[in-house]
Amino acid sequence: MRFYIVALLLLVVLQNLNAQPAGADVGVSGMVKPKRQSVKPAKIKFDFHEGKALLKSGLIIEGQFKYIQPKSAEVPIFVFIEQGSKVQKTVALSMIDKLTLAGAEKGITARLDSTEFVWIDKYRDLYRKVRTGTVELYDNSRVVDETYEYLTDYVFIASRQDYGYKLVRKLADVEMFMSDHPYFMESAKITNRYETQDFRVIVYLVDLFNDPNPMRSLKWDEMTITLKSRQTLQGYGYIQPLDMRNEYIESTSAYVHFYDGKDFKLLSSANIKDVTVGGVTYVGGVYGLGNKFFYGKKWDYQGTEYAIVQRLTTGNNYFFRSRSVAEGLVILKKTGETYLKPVDEAELRKAYLDMLRTGAVQ
């Protein structure tokens, strides 16, 4: 729930940021400051956390740290109690180079049991590390594992070694960090996600980019693809669902997302001859109403040829797979050179699912 709220808030803040002059670098406490609408400050009760800080002076301090929310022009600080002492001291954020605190916001931060903060000089502030790996992500939240309803003035930053840091307003802003693997932005463009400001999609693609074994999370099917050039590809793949209503994708091509064990590829029906999944060769066809190409399972039922196709739904697109076999499944009837949705499609779908459950079809 909190992840959803963060994502929703990010949309609001990014819309405000996009109103800034082109090319302006925006930092939380830097020289260039965006003009934001007045927003009620988030009420967060910050706690003490065991931790260690590396100061810019090179001094390392250990003990308990508690963030103090500043009022108006006050300098942000941490209250610090050194190990073996009961005396409270203060440490300004601008003095800290790195800070690691016990505890983590589940599903958000880079670590499971601790939270790392890093000073980013370009934006002159201390940022929380959200993702680690080849491409790293940061935000300006001070939350470790405290409870909160929403965040205000949310800022999101990406970085990669030798590429520097960049403020992220939308997915397209991380393209420079993924330029050596073009699949990621290609797939975002053909799924109409290139300009998305959805925090979840950005993190999803960065996780995928960083993962040395992406099939652990994707769980794509083993697949063999024969190209029209007669080249055969073997690996893991995912047939992109058919967008029957043009909700996301205007292209009339069908797409297969493929992983050969080393890198991802985005393959178009214009280049594919055959797709085989689990020993079953999928039929390629055209959905007549939208003139859209698709791949589906061939199903002969009561003397009529059908195609079993996964269609795109609001909860089932390239980034978030179906929760069940039945979700998004549609039956298309072969009519001449194209396929159409039959009037008894609901009854046919029920019959197919019944046969699937009994093992009568694959």
Image (cartoon, rainbow, N blue to C red):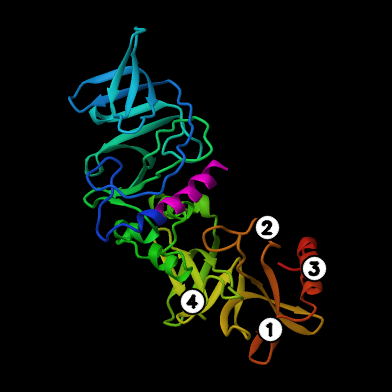
State the separation of the CA atoms marked 2 and 4: 28 Å
Q: Position of residue 167 (x, y in %)?
A: 31, 51
Q: Give the residue type that dot 3 points to.
A: Lys
Q: Nearer the viewer, mark 2 or mark 4?
A: 2
Give 359 or 148, whichever is nearer the viewer.
148
Q: Secondary structure at mark 4?
A: strand
**Residue 141: in magenta span:** no
Of mark 3 and mark 4, the one earlier in the sequence is 4
Of mark 2 and mark 4, the one earlier in the sequence is 4
Q: Is any part of residue 248 visible from this angle? A: yes
Residues marked 1 and 3 touching at CB (< 8 Å) = no
- Note whether 110 is above or below 33 in the view shown: above
Q: Position of residue 123 (x, y in %)?
A: 25, 43
Q: Secondary structure at mark 2?
A: loop
Write down the quadrant of residue 295 in the picture: bottom right
Q: Secondary structure at mark 3?
A: helix
| Residue designated by label 3 | 350
